[in-house]
């Protein structure tokens, strides 16, 4: 049995920036409207999220009030910043003290560099929904530019986000993707399976959050954020069907004029979606093939790439 791989990820930012709201939407199945009742985070909220069998995301949601930030940067600096795989720092784009927020961010980076100089760095420029569409790019690029200036020597990757659209899923899917060990082997295995059954596209989602883990496409699609749109749609469907919460989820089958969609449980911590237009393929064929490879994908960190 392979050793469990745990990745420590810090989720930081000033109080009220939206850290806990996004965490509860992604990992506790909250609706955006339900996050208004959340209390501020006191000290650190720890979450263990299982990905791909042996991979576990150890997420530290750090309270952003001044007394806690002073504690992380001072008395608890070693405990907080040691052995960090990634820092996700959330900026509230509506903040009236953005320059001060930048200064606090810089102080956090100094501690991160001291204890985990090889950590990956991501920033989320959050609450972008407050702007009209024609303003968003300007506001985002302005904030991103200021963040990049103070992020060296780290290479920062930034994303615009909002809890009210698919940008939240898009950003977090990209972040988790970059943290998954052996992702190349995962993709090779999925590509082999996609080609073997001649599907148009196959997507693997993390079960609790519906973040995209990996995908394989044999055809081109116009919709660049189709996976994240599906994530939000499935979660909305789940919330609308109270009976699903009382029974074990099985699968969803959708038949469209030009294609079919099969969505099913996959490994112990993932779902799989298969999109196919091949007239020789049926839902029964796809279900049987998914079942046949399920065990091979159960331990994706340690699998050996057998050919199909």
Image (spheres, rainbow, N blue to C red):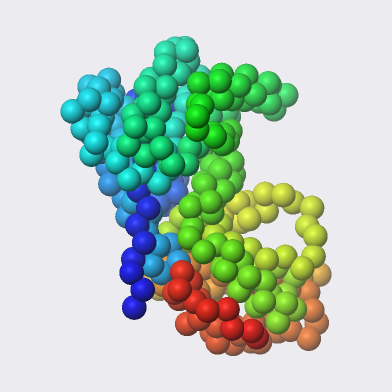
Question: Which residue lies most toward the left here?
Answer: 75
Does 140 sit above or below residue 10?
above
Tell me: 64 left or right of 207: left
Relative depth, front residue between 134 and 306? 306
Who's the residue at 53% across and 29% down the image? 125
* Residue 203 in view in this figure: no
Tell me: 229 left or right of 219: left
Q: Position of residue 180 (x, y in %)?
A: 49, 58
Q: Position of residue 234 (x, y in %)?
A: 55, 58
Q: Position of residue 51 (x, y in %)?
A: 43, 62
Q: Position of residue 287 (x, y in %)?
A: 59, 83
Who's the residue at 34% across and 66% down the image? 4
Does 153 sit above or below residue 51?
above
Who's the residue at 34% across and 51% down the image? 58
Tell me: 276 left or right of 111: right
Q: Quadrant of the C terminus?
A: bottom right
Who's the residue at 51% across and 64% down the image? 182
Question: In terms of image quadrants, where is residue 76?
Answer: top left
């Amino acid at each position: 049995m392979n050793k469990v791989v745990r990745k420590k990820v810090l989720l930081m930012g000033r109080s009220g920036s939206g850290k806990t709201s996004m965490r509860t939407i992604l990992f506790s199945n909250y609706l955006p409207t339900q996050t208004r009742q959340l209390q501020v985070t006191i000290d650190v909220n720890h979450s263990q999220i299982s990905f791909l069998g042996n991979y576990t995301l150890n997420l530290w949601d750090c309270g952003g009030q001044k007394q806690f930030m002073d504690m992380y940067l001072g008395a608890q600096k070693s405990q907080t910043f040691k052995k960090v795989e990634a820092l996700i720092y959330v900026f509230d784009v509506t903040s009236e003290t953005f320059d001060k927020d930048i200064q606090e961010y810089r102080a956090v980076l100094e501690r991160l560099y001291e204890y985990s100089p090889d950590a990956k760095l991501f920033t989320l420029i959050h609450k972008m929904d407050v702007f009209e569409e024609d303003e968003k790019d300007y506001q985002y690029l302005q904030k991103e530019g200021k963040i990049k200036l103070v992020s060296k020597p780290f290479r920062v990757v930034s994303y615009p986000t909002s809890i009210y659209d698919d940008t939240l899923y898009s950003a977090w899917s990209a972040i988790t993707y970059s943290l998954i060990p052996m992702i190349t082997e995962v993709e090779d295995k999925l590509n082999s399976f996609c080609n073997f059954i001649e599907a148009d596209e196959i997507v693997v989602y993390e079960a609790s959050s519906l973040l995209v883990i990996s995908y394989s496409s044999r055809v081109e699609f116009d919709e660049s954020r189709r996976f994240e749109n599906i994530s939000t749609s499935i979660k909305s469907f789940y919330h609308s069907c109270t009976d699903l919460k009382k029974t074990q989820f099985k699968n969803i089958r959708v038949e469209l004029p030009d294609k079919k969609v099969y969505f099913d449980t996959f490994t112990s911590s993932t779902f799989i979606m298969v999109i196919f237009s091949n007239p020789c393929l049926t839902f029964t064929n796809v279900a049987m093939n998914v079942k046949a490879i399920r065990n091979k994908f159960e331990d994706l960190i340690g699998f050996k790439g057998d050919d199909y």
